[in-house]
Image (spheres, rainbow, N blue to C red):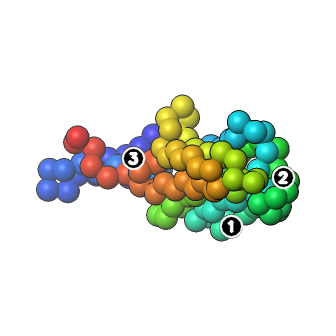
Amino acid sequence: MTAVATVAGVGFAVFGGEDRALTLEVTSPYGYAAHVSWVTPDDGYAEHGWGDMMHASVELPWRTTIEVKSTEGAVSVGGMAVRGEAIGCRILRGDVVLAEKSSGIAAGCIVTLRRAFGAGRTDG
């Protein structure tokens, strides 16, 4: 449950108790990528596979769900295509797409935690 504080008549959501899961995805119609990496404020940099633009090392679609503890910062995910083929990424909270991008070389998605978990004005 999210608590709401009021400052000068404006409500602000306060982190605490709600589901803090984000799903990171990398996809390609070709079924593979050279590399997938992601960054979180809690765990820093992580990667899956390590190929170059000519060699596939990650089977797609790739997906992981992370639990975010921090209240500030951002989460990002990206993938490198093989031989310039199409690749895309998404960051989701539940079924809601928070960030999405596709490219022919590399795709990267980023979302701030304030946007992902709704901190900020609650009065619309």
Residue visible at 55% across and 35% down? 94
How crowded is the residue under tag 1: few (<14 C-alpha within 10 Å), some, or many (20+)? few
In this rendering, which labeled residue sits more in front, label 1 or label 3? 1
Identify the mark at residue 45; answer none if there is no mark. 1
Above or below, 95 against 83 in this view is above
What amino acid does circle 3 point to?
A: Gly
Separation of marks 1 and 2 at Cα, in angstroms: 21 Å
Residue visible at 65% across and 46% down? 87
Q: In what element is the residue under mark 3?
A: loop
Marks 2 and 3, the one that precedes in the sequence: 2
Please identify the quadrant where the C terminus is shown: top left
Q: Nearer the viewer, residue 40 or 71?
A: 40
Please identify the quadrant where the N terminus is shown: top left
* Residue 80 spot, x, y in % from top left: 70, 57
> Is any part of residue 67 visible from this angle?
no
What amino acid does circle 1 point to?
A: Tyr
Residue visible at 78% across and 56% down? 34
What residue occupies the far left of the structure in this picture?
8
Is 64 situated left or right of 59 in this image?
left
* Residue 30 spot, x, y in % from top left: 75, 39
Where residue 61 sits, quadrant-wise, is: top right
What residue is pinned by disc 3? 118
Separation of marks 2 and 3 at Cα, in angstroms: 37 Å
Is 42 situated left or right of 51 in this image?
left
What residue is pinned by disc 2? 56
How crowded is the residue under tag 3: few (<14 C-alpha within 10 Å), some, or many (20+)? some
Residue visible at 62% across and 45% down? 88
* Residue 91 spot, x, y in % from top left: 56, 45
